[in-house]
Amino acid sequence: MHIFCRCVILSIKMLGNFLMRKRREDDELAIIEALYANDRSSANHTRIHTSILTGDRYVREVLEGHELRCKRDFRMEQYIFCNLVQCLRERCHLRDTNFVSVEEQVGIFLYAISKNATNRTLQGQFQHSGETISRYFNIVLNALMILSGSVIQLPPINVPFKVASNTKFMPYFKDCIGAIDGTHIPISISPKDQDPYRNRKGTLSQNVMVACDFDNHFVHVSSGWEGSASDARVLQDALENNFYVPEGKFYLVDAGYANTPNFIAPYRNVRYHLVEQGKCNQRPQNPRELFNLRHAQLRNHVERIIGVLKKRFPVLKCASQYPIDSQAEIAIACCALHNFICNNEGGEQWLDQVESDIDPIKIIDVPSGDMKYTNDIHSLNERRELGSTKRDEIADAMWNDYQDYLRRTRRNTA
């Protein structure tokens, strides 16, 4: 019996060893078959990105080619593109990788915001996977957000040259350091989150507050607010965060804001638009009309800079497909690029010569800003009386000097 048990145990062990050996052989065979199948699949696989014009070669071709091509594809002059790359390398620590240079990374971002290009379009243009395109777009966006802190800065408190050099504005606006306006930028967002972003025209947008100086630089940008938010509410939020007005200074604003000592608005129910004055073909009839006219002439800078910004970067006229946080950051990045271009003496006249590649159907109709202030900000309402007093003082001084000028003119022509 003892010998029989030993034989049984030995047989079981031999059977176990056989089964384990058979299993290993089956596993090895399965691996070989899988590798063979993969080899056959690879042999039959057709690569998508086969163009000899790689993304790096394309960018170099643009930078070495006709200047209009760089302006069309990257919305800036070639030398400014190179300066931007160098700046982002030094300040924002962008670096070349094994497969994508900093020049190509910046090219991907600029091409995207210049043409509102989809990820698939960028894949074909730069010969990279969708994941690579997305990764480097976000890397450059983050770098531009860092750069914005140094190129978008509050203005100095000295009298701006635009004011000091023009007797229409000096000394009445000597304490004015810039102008403010709200502008709507189309967005895309999931249906469940759309309601707050629906503006008064029924489209989806974010309300962006911009402040500029009189040298056509952005000095502050607040983005990401819902399209249904009033301009004044966006301003209040900016004041509660990182925007402030130095003591005794003020910005010019339009009728969508409360008139306060720091934010001087035009008189309500008094003509002031430049077009209206031109059509009437007559001189201002009272202090309020004169004030509104010169207020509009000076505040027109902010409307102009917004127009140039959207013409340069057409992505701001369309609903892009990026996450909502990225859409807010893109607005700030475009303003930072605008300032960088201005600092490098870039031109803007050519913007009228280069056609937009964006289908007009994709351009979304959005409001230009609030038409009137709706008394919805308590902190601003408390200072409106002081603002009215300050505005009246400016208007009266302006009117008295204007009357003296008319009298001198009549005497000289008599």
Image: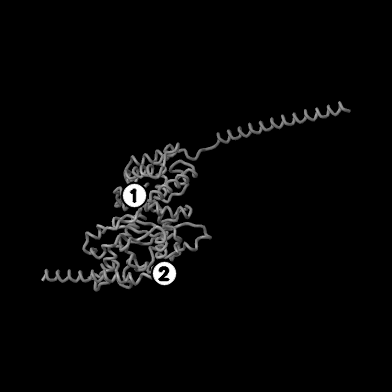
What scheme was used to colour the molecule? one colour
Q: Residues within 10 Å of mark 2 (few under 14, many from 20)?
A: few
Q: Look at 40% across and 71% down and name the residue there.
A: 375
Disc 1 marks a residue whose amino acid type is Phe
Q: Is residue 363 above or below residue 79?
A: below
Q: Is residue 78 above or below residue 324?
A: above
Is label 1 in a helix, a strand or a loop? helix
Furthest residue in direction top, as rendered:
3
Q: Look at 29% across and 55% down and name the residue there.
A: 215
Q: Residues within 10 Å of mark 1 (few under 14, many from 20)?
A: many
Percent across and percent down for residue 108 are: 42, 45
Circles 1 and 2: CB distance less than 8 Å? no
Is label 2 in a helix, a strand or a loop? helix
**Residue 340, numbered label:** 1
Q: Front-most of 4 and 45?
A: 4
Q: Look at 40% across and 65% down and name the residue there.
A: 232
**Residue 378, numbered label:** 2
Q: Quadrant of the C terminus?
A: bottom left
Furthest residue in direction left, as rendered:
414
Disc 2 marks a residue whose amino acid type is His
Q: CA distance from mark 1 to mark 2?
A: 37 Å
Pointer 1 or 2: first along the chain: 1
Q: Quadrant of the N terminus?
A: top right
Percent across and percent down for residue 361 are: 42, 57
Judge left or right: residue 262 versus residue 49. left
Percent across and percent down for residue 100 are: 43, 39
Quadrant of the image occupied by residue 384: bottom left
